[in-house]
């Protein structure tokens, strides 16, 4: 990809992306990365579809989740966050959590190349 291609505005529709299975049963979770590290190593951007799956994780990046449809749930310790369309969450790096709910949502992570930085790529 040329430097000029990296600098152009992109319009991305979640319906054009390939969603990869990320968790379940119970339920299912799917994630689609919208911007590759070649476009931006600074931020990772994508969409996710949660269908009742519960996925435990400790985030290795700062994350923002914004709900498009449904109700996304985030369990952090004893606290349950229920997030609906028009709302978002900011999740700091190092947070131990469980993603859940039934929702289509977008996410942004920083840094986008977190896998390489943590030796996971």
Image (spheres, rainbow, N blue to C red):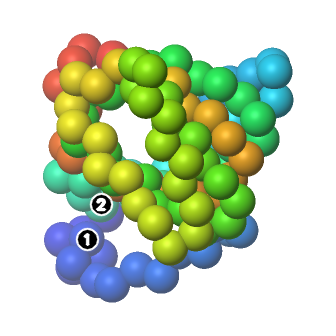
Return the residue nearer the eye: 71 or 11.
71
Q: Which residue is mark 2?
A: 39
| Horizontal relation, residue 119 to residue 79: left or right | left
Please state the horizontal and vertical placement of residue 63, each as a whole percent of the image. Answer: 31, 45
Return the residue nearer the eye: 100 or 79.
79
Q: Secondary structure at mark 2?
A: loop
Residue lying at 68% horizontally and 41% vertically, measured from the top left:
101
Residue lying at 29% horizontally and 76% vertically, measured from the top left:
5
Q: Residues within 10 Å of mark 2 (few under 14, many from 20)?
A: some
Q: Are marks 2 and 1 in contact (CB under 8 Å)?
A: yes
Q: Earlier in the sequence, mark 2 or mark 1?
A: 1
Task: Determine the image quadrant of residue 118.
Answer: top left
Q: Secondary structure at mark 1?
A: helix
Find residue 98 and name its label: none
Please state the horizontal and vertical placement of residue 121, each as a whole percent of the image. Answer: 35, 22
Q: Residues within 10 Å of mark 1 (few under 14, many from 20)?
A: few
Image quadrant occupied by the N terminus: bottom left
Task: Determine the image quadrant of residue 91.
Answer: top left
| Horizontal relation, residue 28 to residue 82: left or right | right
Residue lying at 52% horizontally and 18% vertically, measured from the top left:
56
Find residue 6 and name its label: 1
Please state the horizontal and vertical placement of residue 20, each as a whole percent of the image. Answer: 67, 38
Q: Is residue 19 above or below residue 35?
A: above
The answer to whether one can see residue 20 in this image is: no
The answer to whether one can see residue 72 in this image is: yes
Please state the horizontal and vertical placement of residue 41, each as a whole percent of the image. Answer: 21, 49
Q: Is residue 36 above or below residue 95?
A: below
Residue lying at 29% horizontally and 25% vertically, measured from the top left:
95
């Amino acid at each position: 990809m040329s430097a000029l291609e990296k600098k152009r505005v992109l319009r991305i529709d979640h319906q054009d992306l390939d969603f990869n299975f990320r968790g379940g049963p119970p339920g299912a979770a799917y994630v689609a990365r919208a911007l590759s590290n070649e476009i931006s190593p600074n931020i990772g951007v994508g969409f996710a579809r949660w269908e009742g799956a519960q996925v435990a994780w400790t985030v290795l990046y700062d994350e923002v989740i914004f709900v498009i449809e449904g109700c996304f749930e985030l369990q952090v310790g004893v606290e349950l966050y229920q997030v609906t369309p028009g709302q978002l969450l900011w999740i700091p790096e190092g947070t131990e959590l469980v993603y859940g709910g039934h929702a289509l949502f977008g996410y942004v992570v920083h840094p986008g190349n977190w896998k390489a930085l943590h030796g996971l790529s």
